[in-house]
Amino acid sequence: MLCNRSATVGIKRILRYVSQVRWNHNSALLETHIRNIGILAHIDGGKTTTTERMLFYSGKTNILGEVHHGNTVTDFLVQERERGITICSAAVSFDWRDYRINLLDTPGHIDFTMEVEQSLAAVDGTVVILDGSAGVEAQTVTVWSQADRHKLPRIVFINKMDKDNADLDNCLQDLQKKLGIVPVLLQLPVFEHGKLSGVIDILSGTQVVWDKPSNGRKYTRVPLSETQTLDVRKNLFEVIDVLSGKDDDLAQAIIDAESMENIKTELVLQAIRRCTLKQQVVPVLVGSAYKNIGIQLLMDAVLKYLPAPNERNDIYNCFGTDFVGKVFKVTHDKQRGALSLIRVFRGTLKKGSKIVTAKGTAETVQRMYSPWADEYREISSIAAGNIGLCAGLKSTVTGDLVVSNVSVLRNALKKLSINNASSDESDDEILVNKLSLQTVVPDAVYFCSIEPPSSAYQVALDHALKEIQREDPSLRVSYDETTMQTVLGGMGKLHLDIIKSRIFSEYKIDVDLGPLQIAYKEALEEPCCGTWTAEKEIAGHRQLVRMELTIHGDKYSERFRLDNSSEAQENLKMIRPKQIAFVKKGALAALERGPKLGGQLMDVAITLHHLTIGKGTADTFIMAASAQCVRHVLATAKCRLMEPIMLLEIAMPSEHLSAIQTDLNRRRCTILDVTSRGHFHKVLRANAPLAELEDYSSEVRCISSGTASVAMEPNGYVLLNEMDEASAVRRAHGLE
Ligand code: GDP
Ligand code: MG
């Protein structure tokens, strides 16, 4: 008995080894047999529940996690489990049939748009989940537009068909009306005594039922009844009819066969695949993740209809077989430190190899893992098309493009610009536009102070913020010398709240956040100059710094420079370069806080005319004194406030356009354009001041009875007029 068991274990081990060898070395098989997919939905649509089932049925887990039990694999951060929502896009890999599926579960909230964008740039297709009782909800429209931007083929899974009020027809209409797409229904729900018992697979003409005791792991196909057969034939003909209008090969096959009746299933399947890849149609499946119905067929559909990595991403051809990848997320692991999730597009990334980011920093990959939500399996390489985690990268951040060396990148950019000779894009623009690289992290639009429970926690808090910032570059951390507080800048209220609860659960520091404020910037109206002396005695030594400087508007050149007139040079060349460096550091720090509301000064530069530094003055004093001098000169400067602007993209049924426009006009918005999406929909783009957008998402839902969706992203800063400025100042001081 014992002997038998160990033999079985041995065989299992060998099989596992053989499968690893294949995954690691047979790269030809790899690319065609990989699916990188994102999973998108309105909050509570069932993303996490569906992912749990996929992991369970593929054999990756032995127990079924439930969101309300707080034991799911992908919602592994404590506050995700507490709140039951997905914040970080966790990646998981699993094998299904002969394929590897890498799946990214993405956060649904607008405050985490940067993460969703990065994840979408790393996948080749998506599964969009609908709640069968709710249809297409606002967030679904938003994520759909995001997937549109990345030209991602999609499958829709209509989940929660077990609910009493689930309505398949309504969902199909919603898909057509709200998203303007052509849904191709491939399954029908089957109900027994009013309860969902299985689905009918229209293409194969069979009914599939799931076994309850095995939690749906086992399922069988049973023949259809006579009435079901008629129903299925009708649906199949509808599918073929829609496809033949779009796919020439299928149309030709029908002509050759002289009827739809004799068309082979395989031909229909191929047509669905071609049309899905071209984003002409969207296959629709049904089921219930919670009741364990339909998930295996959904995974089959991912293999059948969504693209392999080598069927997309032609843009990376300019790298040939050289390694190129993209960091789409950085996460922290208690034992392993920072882990960078990398999607490899070309070549192979090997353990121990050197990589360079597009910004030029070089790093070494120390270890690599296959992603498994909060657990990882060590691997030795990541081949083209695959996703993996790398440990040991110290400065690489979310959104970085990584290559094996600088010349690889240079050659690739050269090829890209030659292919694109008509445009005169710079290298940076090519990186951003063609390789969808977001090289600039969006400016924080909200800020608030953060305080540890006592000063004894300050060092631990600084460390925690540093680690969190690497994972999430959209979090800004600064220090306000006037209030002597650490200040967080973020993309919204939820964003900052989540940071607070992460600091509590992961670092055990119970911080206080101050009131949320809009991050205004300040602009200088006219140049100002002045002289200031800072003098102090520290431990018996006289410290002295005297500066004469001008602060003026300039957005193009160095923000700190030395007056190069011969008179000024005579004085400045006497000062040690190291001391000048400290003067510069202090001066630039002072520009972070304008005189009006403490907002960062935009597009200004400082010219230093004259500098005196007393003998024996400490470097730290020089830095502080320099900041003091600049602040003193700034105090007399005429500044204006600039407010953050958001680019809104609102998708809505046409009948709500005028009500939404009227409301936008009240909010000081500038409407940029209105375009049509399908026959019934309009998409409006507008620039809107952030200050006017409090609760805008829910307001829009109210105006449009829940049919419109809003996507927003920061879109720069504009000057406020005097009246609005006065009111912003009053509001910031709590007077309004
Ligand atoms: P997410 O926010 O998209 O990740 O959604 P979750 O997976 O967290 O699911 C939200 C809620 O819906 C949870 O309480 C789930 O148990 C429940 N749920 C998910 N799938 C189904 C389903 O098929 N049927 C029903 N009745 N409830 C479901
Ligand atoms: Mg979730």
Image: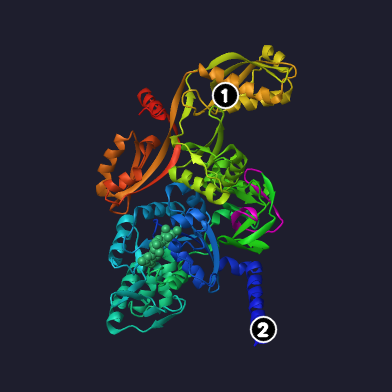
Residue in the picture at 56% in, 18% down: 632
Provide residue 567's location: percent of width, then percent of height: 68, 11
Residue nearer the viewer, 32 or 227:
227
Q: Is residue 276 above or below residue 356?
A: below
Q: Is residue 519 left or right of residue 608?
A: left
Give the quarter of the image for residue 248: bottom left
**What number of labels is visible?**
2
Element type where label 1 sits in the image: strand
Estimate the x, y position of residue 373 in percent, counting from the top left.
55, 61
Within 8 Å: ligand 2 and the Cβ of disc 1? Answer: no
Marks 1/2: CA–CA distance = 75 Å
Outermost residue, bottom side: 1
Residue at the spot of label 2: 7
Residue 344: in magenta span: yes
Could you tell me which residue is drawn at 38 percent across and 37 percent down?
Answer: 687
Secondary structure beneath label 2: helix
User: Relative to 186, is 148 above or below?
Assistant: above
Residue 18 in percent (x, y) is at 65, 75
Q: Which mark is residue 347?
A: none
Say if the magenta span includes residue 238.
Answer: no
Q: Residue 543, can we see it?
A: yes
What residue did someone put label 1 on? 605
Q: Which residues are magenta?
A: 333-360
Q: Tell me which amino acid carries mark 2.
A: Ala
Residue 68 as seen in the image, left or right of residue 76: left
Specify the amino acid type for callout 1: Ala
